[in-house]
Amino acid sequence: MQPLHPEHGRPQEPTNRLLRDDTRFALGRIAVFQYATVAVFLFLIAGFWILQVRDHEMNSELAERNRIKTVPLVAPRGKILDRDGRIIVDNRPSYRVLLSRENLNRDHLAAIAEGLHLDPEDLQNRVRRYDSRAKYVPVPIKTELTRGEMAFVESHRDAQTFPELEIAEDSSARLYPQSGLAAHVLGYVGEVSDQELDTPEFVKYSLGEIVGQSGLERQYNDILMGVDGQKRQVVDVYGHEREVLEDVEPTPGRNLQTTLDIDIQSAAELSLEGRKGAIVALDPRNGEVLAMVSRPTFDPSMFEGHISTQQWNALSNDPDAPLRNRAIQQTFAPGSTFKPFVALAGLETGTITPDTTYHCAGHATFYDADRKCDAVHGTINLHQAIVKSCDIYFYNVGDRLGIDTIAQYAQMAGIGKKTGIDLPNEAEGLMPSTQWKLRTRNDRWYAGETISVAIGQGAVNITPIQLAVAVGGLSMGGVWYRPHLVREAASSNQPRTASFRPENIATIVSAMRGVVNEEGTGTSARIPGIDVCGKTGTAQRISNTLAKANKALANELRDNGWFVAFAPCEHPEIVVAALWEGGEHGASAAPMVRDVLKAYFDKKLRQSQPKPHEIAWFRGPIRPGPTP
């Protein structure tokens, strides 16, 4: 029997067992807690070891990235000035949005594109282009932010939302003249493309850099571009600057003073307004370009930053080719503006004299082909033939000279050759010859082809800048300077010269004076008090046969109108060449040249008159002071 409890008389064994069970249970729970505590401490210690020992360098770098940001400081581009120091192209304050690739989350790109009104696919492709670059190189994604876009960036560029968003001040944003004034000469800037980076010209630049893409901006990009700086700053979790660790100021680009005269440029722009064509004005005494206009034009500001694919396609596929500088990049048949050079060849070779006459009945037959003239001029000499622009006369002169003699004298004047102007992508033009045709077409030259070339038709093609240079050198008696837009480019500008008999030059100059001041084809270029010499030119764009067969095409491809002039006739200071595409007659281009010439001489007159503060008042004779 079990022993009884001394006080209650109950058995003692069950109670002791319960006590022992409770004690073991409590001890077990304590042990579990102790083991769990040890496990937690071991886990924490292992994590601490991983963070502080094994991955110390990586985590330190990540922490530093979250704390320190490097912001590029874009160097301001140099300003572009006219010959009088007036600013044509300036810089303006702007901001651009960058994507930090160190904090980039590609899942954010769609939302960022929506907030900044970007095409999501374009943004994806833009970021993908930078995959091969170092992580610290940011991706510029937009310039010219609106207030709403600026607010979007400011409110979302914190560590919790879009930590990859950054704003950088852009001091290289360009301020171009309105209405596309001188756009083809000035050019535009844009982000360097992948294709350009593969060319020698752009090998020293990096993806994302803003460089000159056309015109003077491209030709003198190395001068206009400065050296970028950078700022290393401490930022808080919201991306706000707390401390600047390093601030390397950018080095601005150099200013570029051009030979352009903004007053003459404006006059040329207005005279060509609403037309398609080009005008070039230059000083034949040194080759300085005073004005250059091409129409239609474009707005260079639209290329700032990143132009969309749709915008680029609209410009590049426009049938009127607004991006093409017609003054230097497109060639045209010169028409009758070519006749003075044929006349010079005839006089210099003795083929004709000033008194040589031919009869114009309004048409003539050459090599079984009937050739027409604009009028019936009767029997005329060289002077009258240039004044009246008689085709029959020059058909006869060209036939006697032959193509190679014509080519020889035309090439002396630079026709069919690049002028070497300091602008990119100049066209060469064409002056045909027997060798040219044999080399390029494997065929011989036919005498009947010379007839067309003698009046500036057929295979001969020139640019407006070529015509201005050629006539300018002719007016100087055979001295041709390379045209240039920046005075620094003139340091090595040694002219080409040719020895012509002065009396022959005088004969041609006298005839070109008659074109304007007698009953010639260019009387609408006459300016009272100014001695103007000029030559009209009408150049067909399609043959007479095709024009008769297709009236709609003939109406679309109306003849081009040319006029080239210099003044004064003796000791010329300016030469102007104008092309009006579809102008139909050379006389239609003469008023445009007149306006440019008048702007030049009006300005010269204003500058020659003393200003009120420059008038020296009489103060009586100056007497010597007392001798010390």
Image (cartoon, rainbow, N blue to C red):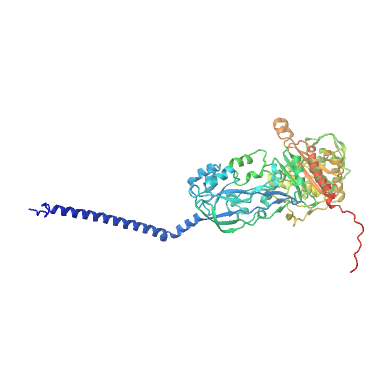
Q: Position of residue 224 (x, y in %)?
A: 67, 53
Foreground: 217 or 168?
168
Judging depth in this view, the residue of 380 and 440 nearest the camera is 380
Q: Residue furthest left?
A: 1
Residue 253 x, y percent position in the rendering = 66, 55
Residue 165 in percent (x, y) is at: 53, 49
Relative depth, front residue between 67 and 115: 67
Could you tell me how many numbered marks the image carries? 0
Position in image of residue 211 (x %, y %): 63, 51
**Residue 56 occupies which quadrant of the picture?**
bottom left
Q: Is residue 442 visible?
A: no
Q: Within the image, what quadrant is residue 150 found in?
A: top right
Viewer-proximal residue among 151 and 145? 151
Q: Is residue 110 left or right of residue 13?
A: right
* Residue, far bottom: 628
The quadrant in which the C terminus is found is bottom right
Q: Is residue 170 visible?
A: yes
Q: Is residue 114 toward the left or the right of residue 21 in the image? A: right
